[in-house]
Image (cartoon, grey):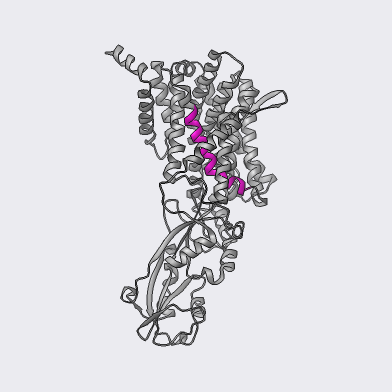
Amino acid sequence: MEREISSLIHESPEILVFLSLAAGYFIGKFKIKGFGIGTTASVLLAAMVLGQFSIDVPPILKSISFALFAFCIGYQVGPQFFGALRKEGMNYLWISLVVVLTGLATAVGLGKLLHFDAGTTAGLFAGAMTQSAVIGTANGAVDQLAITAEAKKILSNNIAVAYAITYLFGVVGVIIFFKLLPNLFRINLKAEAKDLERNMGGGTESKSPGLFSWSRQVGLRAYEITNGKIVGKNVREVEALFLPARVAVYQILREGKLFEPDRETLLSAQDTLVVAGKYVGLVSAPEIIGREIDVSTIIDIVGESLDVCVLNPKMVGKTLGQIALAGGARAHGIFLTRITRQGHELPILENTIINKCDVLRLVGTKELVERAAEDIGYAQRSTVVTDLVMLGIGCVAGTLAGMIVIPVAGIPLTLGTGGGVLVAGLMCGWLRSVNPGFGQISDGGQWLLNDLGLSLFVACIGLSSGKAALDALQSSGLIIFLAGIVLALIPILAGMIFGKYILKMNPVLLLGGLTGARVIPQAMTTLEEDAESTTPALGFAAPFAFANVFLTIMGSIIINIM
């Protein structure tokens, strides 16, 4: 029976590939007190165990899966990467460079000191710095080395082993370290976050991630005018009585007829006003206007909630307060209930700066929301469409670019397939931000390319290195793990010292930026919980975009300089 199973597996190695994915995704779901090893590491470990069967996985499967993953990463961070290369984004660029270059120097130094080969050093860097894409660029660089096939296999195996050993602390240990970091540098995170909110205009309730603020929800109400003080005033003057909350008079019922007023329309004693606004503002409506009545007996307005990607250059770099002021009458009746950047929610504050490709959730009547979407940028409507022409051409162009070899100080450096496709993805993502009709990849398509592409790649790596991994774990597992701890923490400390004492950045934005530079969204979420504020997310997106690119190409550099 055992012989039959072995024969079946060797004839159909795809069985173990799929089994590695299934087992890895299953194991990756488990968490202990909120911490887990994640899907990527779980798939790799499962593949290493199954790799004891010593099967041969077609190299082309590994290359294609990583190319799809690398392209998607570039596509996702492209708009933010290029958008952050403005004056206000330079601090985040320097932070990212300090973290990445310190990580590179530390990894190479540890590799030389502990006599690691190039593969082990690259895997150490990939795991401790929690950038799985490094495995791909490092393997691509190994393939270009002028060494025997057996030596290449040893290096590739060592990359996977060192990554597997160091990845867990690279995530869990670093999250815990970020919880300790404010106290280590004598930063009162809650107080600093409150001060930042006040300096940015306040006006929003802090909240924990995953919760929402009732006061941000928009409601539609109707009120009869029983307060004689507003009779004879115009719509603009009545709406001003609600400040700092915002409300909008959508319709007026007068003598049995509904009409849409302009802001200079005068009110009469018999009017009934249909008013929209956030609940925190509508609380005072009975006192300001009069008795509330059932709005459904008067009108049924079609409302819309729409996510809009910011592309209008007149809005980029401006604060919410400046945008609202510039919007004038065209902003009337439109309510902002959510802002996200790279998928993370930002605080809605007067001085929150809007970046290109931030996503604003607008609420209002359908006509007003659609008009605002045209002014702001591109409406992100649900779709299942993916432009496979752009994806295919982008991967071809990236593969060709990755073949270019540039000698630097006598070292032949190349991006490799992974790095080249990553750059192609960056360009395609940026082009889409310029022209929203170009190269669409649906949300589901992005998840599939990103998550499954990487998992399929590491499954191939794990299956190929299974037997060698067991020997490496037994002989040098502890020393690699300890080296991973050092490498995981030193770049964070270097970035913290540089940002706090050289750049003199706000500590909340600096900590958020460091989680981005270390590409650990979970650590940023932990900071938000500890700060009881979403302000750390303001510093996350730009370094996250920079680091995804810089860290990825380090795999090739480490292989070539070790």
Range shown magenta: 63-84
Q: Is residue 230 above or below residue 492?
A: below
Residue 544 seen in this snapshot? no
Number of dots carrying numbers: 0
Which quadrant of the rendered structure holds the N terminus? top left
Q: Please, what is the dominant secondary structure of the magenta stretch? A: helix
Farthest residue in the top direction?
A: 3
Say left or right for 253 vs 178.
left
Farthest residue in the right direction?
A: 409
Q: Is residue 249 magenta?
A: no
Residue 223 in percent (x, y) is at 38, 78
Residue 395 in percent (x, y) is at 53, 35
Residue at x 48% of width, y 45% of height = 526
Q: Nearer the viewer, residue 299 or 393?
A: 393
Q: Is residue 24 above or below residue 95?
A: above
Farthest residue in the left direction?
A: 1
Residue at x 54% of width, y 21% of height = 479
Q: Nearer the viewer, residue 495 or 224?
A: 224
Residue at x 43% of width, y 18% of height = 56
Q: Nearer the viewer, residue 390 or 132?
A: 390
Q: Is residue 67 magenta?
A: yes
Residue 231 seen in this snapshot? yes
Residue 396 in percent (x, y) is at 54, 33
Q: Quadrant of residue 315?
A: bottom right
Which quadrant of the rendered structure holds the C terminus? top right
Residue 319 in percent (x, y) is at 59, 60
Q: Quadrant of residue 304?
A: bottom left
